[in-house]
Amino acid sequence: MTDKNNTQKEEIKEHVVLVHGLYMHGNGTKVLSHWLRKAGFTTSEFSYSTVKADLDTNAEKLHQHMESLDAPTVHAVGHSLGGVLLQHMYKTHKYSKPGRVVALGSPFLGSQVARTLRKNPIASAMLGKSMANLMESGKREWSTEHELGIIAGTVSVGLGTILPKMLESPNDGTVAVSETKLPGHKEHITVPVSHTALIFSPKTSDKVISFLKQGTFA
């Protein structure tokens, strides 16, 4: 009887899909995945081609991954481009399972850094197809019933420091806080970390866990 009860408890755990950012791999989200598992969630790290594949292709693969999950509730956390991909997936595919979404430093409204780099043909090619889709798309908004929480960093380490005129303040060194404010979100907060640190910081993980469990960062 005990084994049966334990199996039932395991089956009803809520699942979190973690989606990495530009030039990264699913392994880059394992630290955050660790904290989520300690909080009682099951997790999976979704990997995709950030350069060679466009947003439509990646959204289709992400949708297939999320549809394959047995958990009754499926949340998602996206870092940087990963958050943009999640927004695109929920917009272009019907996903009916309940769950909340958290975006970490995602340039939903476009990226001044990317716009500047795209003026150079070599740098533009390095940004890849998914970033090109983001820059060429029109107005974005969150239009699904799944609640969205957004966390933006305010420690400018990266291009924001090297080329301060490229990126308005406050920013996380790669993305300006103003670029993360997607219309339709439920809550938006800032944390004193850099862009990369958003997926490693205990401060961020605490806020992510709070939103996924309660629908608020408070």
Image (cartoon, rainbow, N blue to C red):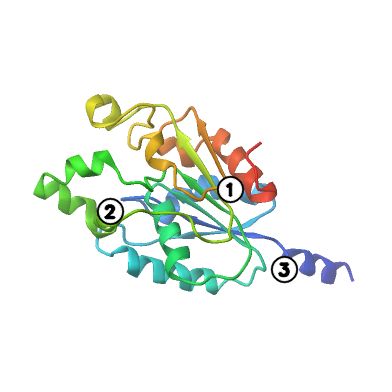
Residue with the mark numbered 2 = 131
Where in the figure is residue 14, as x and y percent of width and height? Answer: 67, 60
Residue at the image point whose x is 18% and y is 42% from the top: 117
Q: Out of 175 and 20, give the one closest to the viewer.
A: 175
Disc number for residue 34: 1
Which amino acid, mark 3? Glu
As drawn, the label of residue 60 is none
Does label 2 or label 3 sit earlier along the sequence? 3
Q: Position of residue 58 (x, y in %)?
A: 36, 66
Mark-to-mark CA distance, 1 and 2: 28 Å
Q: Amino acid at mark 1?
A: His
Q: Position of residue 18 (x, y in %)?
A: 50, 55
Asked whether 168 or 48 is in front, the reply is 168
Query: Residue 40: x, y in percent?
Result: 69, 52
**Residue density around tag 3, few if under 14, some if 14–19, many if 20 or more, within 10 Å:** few
Q: Describe residue 167's horizontal placement relative to residue 189 as left or right.
A: left
The answer for how far apart the CA atoms under marks 3 and 1 are is 19 Å
Instruction: State which tag comes first along the sequence, 1 or 2.
Output: 1
- Distance CA(mark 2)–CA(mark 3): 37 Å
